[in-house]
């Protein structure tokens, strides 16, 4: 499989998972034109998108879903809770392109086996995804305020983990956000901090996780360098050297790269 983060951050999210015959967009939280341009950067024609799978209904994840589905006749997959919550904001979708799954039950899109798993976020029925093809597994885990044992088990042994590292706690606490918004972000239904991401990776390393991309960074309360350094330091304190685990940070406003497994 190939994994390409097109955009990742609090202002918009969209990634593409590809196999030999299948291309799946994970969320479409940027304007349609921007997503089409980013797909061109990774040599994918939008007409070749097999499906859009949705994590949850917040605008930074659904902004471009309607226009892309209508223009390119793309099926959209979400659970019932997310469909109910996002439908008023994405416009009309052709009935044949409205696809509903049950969280926790795997299904196939082309030759890729997907399992949606529940995350802890202040949305109707938020999920992450595990993608499996030809012995390779990619786990997409963002927008979760905590990682309980069941969620950690889902990420165990992933060949590539796309993991939220949303904020630096001190930057958030001393930043300009209103108190209630700070509480929301720091809650168990908010977002993972850099420190929490590092702590999780120390627990996942013994399971075989060796490739990680940090994701969904806050524009106001984080930077790529701060996130990278914080997680690297946490790993080093856990005895995990730089050579032992590949670590990258997804860009907010442009394609990060194509990661082939």
Image (tube, rainbow, N blue to C red):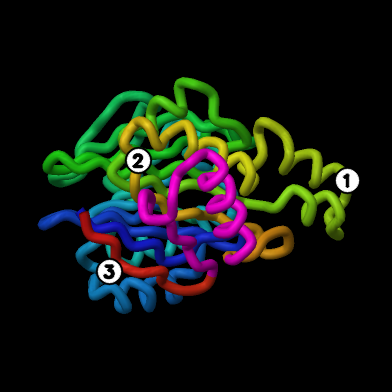
Q: Which residue is mark 1?
A: 179
Q: Position of residue 142 (x, y in %)?
A: 51, 45
- Residue sitting farthest toward the top: 149
Label 3 – label 1 distance at C-alpha: 41 Å
| Front: mark 3 or 2 | 2
3D distance between C-alphas at marks 3 and 2:
31 Å
Provide the secondary structure element on which disc 2 rests: loop
* Disc 3 packing (10 Å; few <14; some 14–19; many ≥20): many
Can residue 87 be seen here? The reply is no
The magenta span reads: 225-252
Which residue has dot 2 on it?
Answer: 209
Which disc, if any, is residue 46?
Answer: 3
Q: How many other residues sit within 10 Å of disc 1, few (<14), some (14-19) or many (≥20)?
A: few
Q: Is residue 17 above or below residue 159?
A: below
Could you tell me which residue is drawn at 64 percent across and 44 percent down? 195
Label 1 secondary element: helix
The residue nearer to you, when weighing 102 against 176, is 176
Q: Nearer the viewer, mark 2 or mark 1?
A: 2
Q: Nearer the viewer, residue 67 or 19?
A: 19
- The answer to which quarter of the image holds residue 99 is top left
């Amino acid at each position: 499989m190939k994994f390409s983060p097109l955009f990742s951050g609090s202002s918009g999210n969209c990634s593409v998972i590809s196999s030999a015959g299948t291309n799946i967009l994970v969320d479409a939280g940027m304007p349609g034109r921007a997503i089409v341009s980013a797909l061109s950067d990774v040599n994918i024609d939008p007409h070749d998108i097999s499906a859009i799978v949705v994590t949850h209904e917040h605008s930074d994840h659904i902004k471009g879903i309607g226009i892309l589905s209508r223009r390119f006749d793309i099926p959209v997959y979400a659970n019932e809770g997310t469909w109910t919550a996002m439908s008023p904001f994405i416009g009309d979708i052709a009935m044949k392109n409205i696809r509903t799954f049950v969280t926790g039950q795997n299904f196939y899109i082309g030759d890729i086996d997907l399992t949606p798993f529940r995350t802890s976020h202040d949305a109707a029925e938020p999920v992450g995804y595990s993608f499996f093809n030809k012995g390779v597994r990619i786990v997409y885990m963002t927008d979760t305020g905590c990682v309980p044992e069941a969620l950690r088990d889902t990420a165990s042994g992933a060949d590539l983990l796309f993991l939220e590292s949303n904020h630096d706690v001190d930057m958030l606490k001393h930043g300009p956000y209103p108190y209630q918004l700070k509480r929301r972000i720091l809650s168990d239904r908010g977002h993972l901090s850099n420190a929490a991401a590092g702590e999780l990776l120390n627990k996942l390393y013994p399971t075989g996780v060796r490739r990680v991309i940090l994701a969904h960074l806050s524009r106001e309360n984080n930077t790529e360098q701060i996130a990278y350094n914080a997680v690297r330091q946490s790993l080093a304190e856990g005895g995990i050297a730089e050579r032992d685990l590949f670590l990258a940070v997804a860009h907010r406003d442009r394609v990060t790269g194509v990661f082939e497994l």
